[in-house]
Image (cartoon, rainbow, N blue to C red):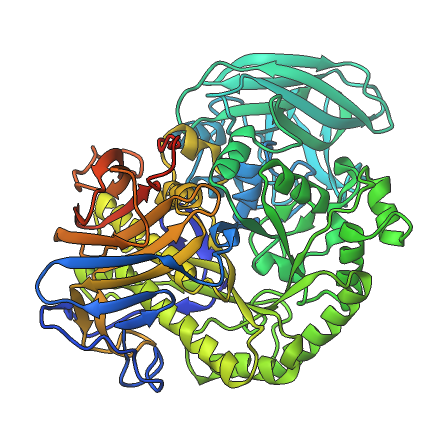
Amino acid sequence: MRTDSMAQIIGACVLSLCGVLALGAAAGEGGQTKKAAKSAKSAPAAEGVQSPTGFSAAGTRGPVEFVPAQGDKARLAVEADEETPWQVSPLIYGTFSEPLNFGGPIYRSLWAQKVMNPSFEPGCPPLESSLSLPGDPFDDAAVRAIAKGEWLPILPTKKDEAASPWLAVGQGEAKFSLAGDAYNSERCQKIEASASARGVGVAQPPELQAWRKTRFHLRCFLRCEGPAPAVAASLYYQAKPIASARFDSVATEWKAFEASFETPVVNQPRNAFLLALTFDGPGTLFVDQVTLTPEDAIDGFDPQAIEQTRAMKTGWIRWPGGNYASGYHWRDGVGPLDKRPTRKNPAWKGLDPNYVGTDEYLQLCRLVATEPYICVNAGNGTAQEAADWVEYCNGSIDTPMGKLRAQNGHPEPYGVKYWNIGNEMWGDWQIGHCTPEVYAERYAKWTKAMRERDPSIRFVACGQGPFGDANMRRWNEVLMDKTGKDLEAVDFHTYIRLDRLTKLDAQTRLDAMAAMPIAFEQALMDFRALCLKRGMDQVRVDEGEYSCAAIPGVKPRLMTATTMVAHAGWLHSFIRQGEYVLGANATEFSLFNPRDGQFDRHHVRYDLFQLYATEAGSQPVRARLETPVRTYPKRIGVIGPVRDLPLVDAVALKDPKDGSLSISLINRDLQNEIPLEVDIRGFVPQPQGTKHLYWDDLKETADGAPHPRTHFQTSAFDAAGKFQVSLPPRAVMLLKLWPEEHQARPNADR
């Protein structure tokens, strides 16, 4: 992801661009609904998203044939006994995240510990920066009051005398500095207090999970010079002390001190406490490695974040980045937590404490029952480093790195199967970015070294997203020419940025957002055709990062509903092209944030993916869809004109486990309801099925309310013979049917 142009994506996470798809047309240009019937033949081979003449969305897309319909009604014929020879991979329900500014969302959401810059290293943004973070979890008024000294008196310090976001507090004369001889990393906080100093020390406001857990574990390392001070560890809420502990045995050598704090229940999404470590002068105190963790943390992770990730049936989690991966050295993240070095975040603002390293990540994968997917450093890393990483994860204890893993408490190999060779190495924002020729050489060198440690692993190359100019396309072509049969899969990234096209009216941009997954699918089909032309049938695709940005000026409910339609469209594209789509990793927004689950603020993708992953099945069957269509007669950014865009989208899947059939439907029309007739052949369903419906009536919530979620309804429907359903505007519907002979129908309620 690019670091040179930051943008708020869906209002939940600050990301920069990588493999960006910008869509545009003449100002005011909108779609034109077409009622006249057209031929359903596939688009000519010369047509595609990069063709000057554009492409037609009619024709066969995987197991589904799209046919422009007469009138405003849609018809779907499902051939339930005509199965594809392949099944959809559960990896399409994957996610991606990395430590961004202030370490979020990894360290501000997923990891349960809440102190920022616990090892007092220089280079972390000041406290005030936390108030501008996306999804700000702080009580802003309280933090501003703390920064003004209204909770505890603030002592003036120069830059890097007190490590941000820590504050120097107390009264009287005291000197603050960042000293060497630290317990952890390069620096620790040194406080020299005069005889007149009272309550001097350091403090910062953590935001705690006080809606769920009221007991928190404090751990810190202290030492002194001269007389041993009595150190007070205190926790404040609403400017009043609510818990405290006294540490009397501080010595000249580093020593760990621990205490438990009890907090009140704060049942709201934002809060601010104040943690302080203070003492009275005279004396000199050194402070390092201060952490505050809820006592219900599971192996260091937030239990609600774990439950949310598990419940969504997350296919795999791409880690550790992102841009971050191109400067990440895995040895920094193994061994005892207290001794892991704090490093400057290689791609984003702030510092990285390295608490979430290889063993923690792989334990997370076990906790949430997901497939590991590691992106190695092909930026400023080496092939040897990557090979050692493979050995650390998969080698026996007889190997050097396997022995190191065992010494760190994990004797059994992890068996990590999927390895991504670098992140966006084509981008000039990337550490170690390079030409396609150089990357192809790195890919060959890295994979050779890694395969020598474990011949069973699979590789995913860093590819250019299938949209774009000739330089972008050249990257993939050079990679294919240089690697040939050694190329197993490529990683594409696509961020749709309609918010930048300010000359377009909001409705046109919303329509384009809902429509873009079809263009993306066409690009996948074009890439597949390129692979087949070169005799490279073995190449698979991972959409390693993707999402779409919110459009300024659009009301929240409409924005949420359109985002839902777009993300459902992504899933349909992955399903239809599942023969060669290995997996996908949606950019994580609220999945790791326990507040979003607790306070009903999940990104709409959470509910949508959970529904599809649990109800949609995995075996595609053939279908023919007659649907009203729309045409975009002008070029849209890098994509030529789009003809015959289906307003209804559909996939049909059987579940090999219970024999059920699901029909998933999208209404891309954001304003009009569309009636649909369904005819199922080769499958006799029970008289009643279950209908899952996501939609939004666009009734706005009160000002200041959290981001709204779409309505979700589950109901029974008559599935006998040909049946009809009505698709509300901007809706996603999943119809679940069980075979007639199925005796005990599962409970469809989630």
**446 lies left or right of 267:** right
Tell how many labels: 0
Instruction: Tell me residue 520's x, y (percent).
Output: 37, 68
**396 lies left or right of 374:** right
Of residues 602 and 649, the one nearer the viewer is: 649
* Snapshot quadrant of residue 59: bottom left
Of residues 237 and 328, the one nearer the viewer is: 328
Q: Residue at x 22, y 61 (%)?
A: 511
Q: Residue at x 15, y 64 (%)?
A: 628
Relative to 139, does residue 461 appear above or below in the rendering? below
Q: Residue lying furthest front in this view?
A: 741
Examine the rendering and report whether any part of residue 197 can be seen. Answer: no
Relative to 559, does residue 497 appear above or below in the rendering? below
Examine the rendering and report whether any part of residue 549 can be seen. Answer: yes
Q: Residue at x 27, y 48 (%)?
A: 732
**204 lies left or right of 706:** right
Relative to 351, does residue 228 appear above or below in the rendering? above
Instruction: Tell me residue 328's x, y (percent).
Output: 68, 56
Instruction: Tell me residue 666's x, y (percent).
Output: 26, 53
Of residues 373 and 3, the one nearer the viewer is: 373
Relative to 168, does residue 48 appear above or below in the rendering? below
Q: Residue at x 49, y 27 (%)?
A: 149
Instruction: Tell me residue 440's x, y (percent).
Output: 65, 78
